Image (spheres, rainbow, N blue to C red):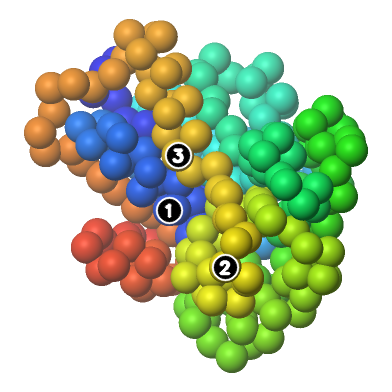
Amino acid sequence: MNKQPIGIFDSGVGGTSIWKEIHKLLPKENSIYLADSINAPYGPKGEKAIIQLCIKNTELLLEKGCKLIVVACNTATTNAIDYLRTTYKVPFIGIEPAIKPAALNTKTNAVGILATQGTLTSALFSKTSGKFANNINVIEQVGEGIVDLIESGKLYSEEMTTLLKTYLEPMIKANIDYLVLGCSHYPYLIPQLTKLLPNDVKIIDSGEAVARQTKTILDKHNSLNNENNYPKIEFFTNGNPEVIEKLLGNSFRADYLNF
Ligand code: DGL
């Protein structure tokens, strides 16, 4: 069990930001990453379609013998994790926008959240937001187009700068002091967001929390891999492998897989 890989999937390449955190905290674990780039973005798709895509990804990771599955996609988590947990025996770790720490720590009483339409309209997000941010001015913004640009290798482009400026403007006007990144593609935008936001705005994403939770759950199941000095790490994509390799700093290979 302990040698079996951790499975990680996302609608595309963005969940590699989560994989990085997991690999940093659990460097001895074998892992398999699936980028369902051909179906990205999940954000505008309805809940039913998102669940079907999650079933496909989950079953492939289970065929490959994964001991735990990280749904490294806020849109997939907020729409499908309940279904996955009740359908499969393997433990699932999900990712949700970190609205709670932002709401608890804001001094200006205004926080921004950038996420996909699928996340912002999900029942799980409105539950969390209602619970923790009821008295806070939450400026929600759908990051339309951002995932498509990252998936097509245009992380640093004029189109991206224009989109980000447009999306941040109402948040800056509302005097936010926290920006919550509610999509696993967005941590790759942090260098650009930092330049565009006032200095005192803090950016939070959920990557580290997901890695910590992965460790906790593996530990609880007695499934941590502590012995392995040469972990097997595999990236599969049904899109262009070069996009993932570039995001990973060209230090890992990705393979095309038709799934
Ligand atoms: N990485 C996905 C997320 O965290 C991107 C969503 C999408 O495919 O629209 O939500």
Q: Name the residue carrying label 3.
A: 208
Where disc 2 sits, the SS reads loop
CB contact under 8 Å: marks 3 and 2 = no
Q: Name the residue carrying label 1.
A: 16
Q: Name the residue carrying label 2.
A: 199
In front of the other: 178 or 192: 178
Q: Earlier in the sequence, mark 3 or mark 2?
A: 2
Q: Residue at x 30, y 41 (%)?
A: 23
Residue 26 found in image quarter = top left
Image quarter hosting the N terminus: top left
Image position, residue 82 (x, y; %): 71, 25
Please tell me the numbered disc located at residue 193.
Answer: none
| Amino acid on which the number 2 mark rests in the picture | Asn
| Amino acid on which the number 1 mark rests in the picture | Thr
Confirm if mark 2 falls within 8 A of ligand 1: no
Image position, residue 119 (x, y; %): 76, 48
Furthest toward the front, the residue is 107
In front of the other: 209 or 33: 209
Image position, residue 243 (x, y; %): 41, 71
Q: Please tell me whether residue 123 is drawn above or below residue 34 in the rendered image.
A: above
How far apart marks 1 and 3 lie (CA) works out to 13 Å
How far apart marks 2 and 1 lie (CA) works out to 27 Å
Q: Residue at x 77, y 52 (%)?
A: 108
In front of the other: 181 or 157: 181
Furthest toward the left, the residue is 229
Q: Earlier in the sequence, mark 1 or mark 3?
A: 1
Q: Residue at x 44, y 17 (%)?
A: 217
